[in-house]
Image: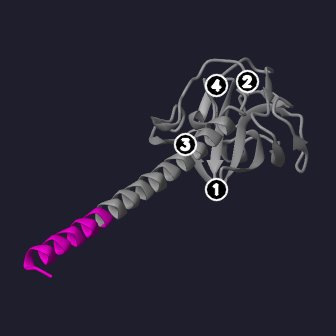
Amino acid sequence: MSAETLAAQRNQTLQNAANDVAQAQRQYDLAERQDGLSSAALEISKESTYLKERSVFLRPTAGKLGSPYGMRLHPILHYWRLHDGMDIGGNCGQPIVAASDGVVVKAAMGGYNGGSGNNVRIDSGDINGINVQEAYLHMQSISVSVGQKVVKGDLLGYVGSTGLSTACHLHFSVYENGKGTNPAKYLTL
C-alpha cells in the first residue's frame, strides 16, 4: 500500500472519528436540553399546583384591608413590631368564614388571650409540602369548637374587637410550618 493510500485511509478514519464525536456531542447536548426542559416542566407544574391551592382560600370576611403584614407602629403599645397578619375592617357582628378546609385546633374565648382576644385557629394540613394554619383574631363570638372539621365558607364566628384591639376588625394570620407568613400569599384582596 502506498503512502498516499495510507494517508487517505488515515484521513478518512480521523474524519469518521470526528463525525462520531460531533454526533455524540449533539446527542449529549440534546439530552442536557431535555433534562433542563424536564426540570423546568416539573417546576412549572409545582408552581401551577401552588397557584391552584392558593385559589382555594376564600376571603374570611367582607371589608377593606386595614393594616397589612409587616413592621408597624403598634396603635396601642406605641412601639414598632411585626404585625404578623392582616387586618380586614368590618362591623362588629359581621360573619367570619373559614378561608379553607381544615380542622379547628384552637377556639379560645374569654377576653384578652395574650392580646388575640377571642380567636380560632384552623389546621388546613399539607399544601405543597407545607403545613398551613390560619388564625382568626379579635372575634366577638365563636361558632366552632376544637376538633371540628370545617369546609371553606363555614361560619367560624363574628367580627369583634376583643383583646388588644382598637376597633371592630378581623386580624387574619397564616402560618407555614408554625411560622407566620404574609397572608397575601394565600388571599387575593
Q: Earlier in the sequence, mark 1 or mark 4?
A: 4
Question: Marks 4 and 2, how far apart in space?
Answer: 7 Å
Residue at the outermost front position? 1
Q: Are marks 1 and 4 in contact (CB under 8 Å)?
A: no
Q: Earlier in the sequence, mark 2 or mark 3?
A: 3
Q: Tag 3: Cα neighbours inside 10 Å, few (<14), some, or many (≥20)?
A: few
Residue at image position (33%, 61%) is 25
Q: Which residues are magenta?
A: 1-20
| Side of 1 where 111 appears, left or right | right
Residue under pointer 3: 44
Q: Relative to 40, does residue 159 appear above or below in the rendering? A: above
Residue type, mark 4 in image: Ile
Q: Tag 2: Cα neighbours inside 10 Å, few (<14), some, or many (≥20)?
A: many
Q: Are marks 2 and 3 in contact (CB under 8 Å)?
A: no
Residue type, mark 3 in image: Ile
Q: Are marks 4 and 2 in contact (CB under 8 Å)?
A: yes
Question: Marks 2 and 1, how far apart in space?
Answer: 24 Å
Q: Earlier in the sequence, mark 4 or mark 3?
A: 3
Q: Are marks 4 and 3 in contact (CB under 8 Å)?
A: no
Residue under pointer 1: 177
Q: Are marks 1 and 3 in contact (CB under 8 Å)?
A: no
Report the front residue among 66 and 99. Answer: 99
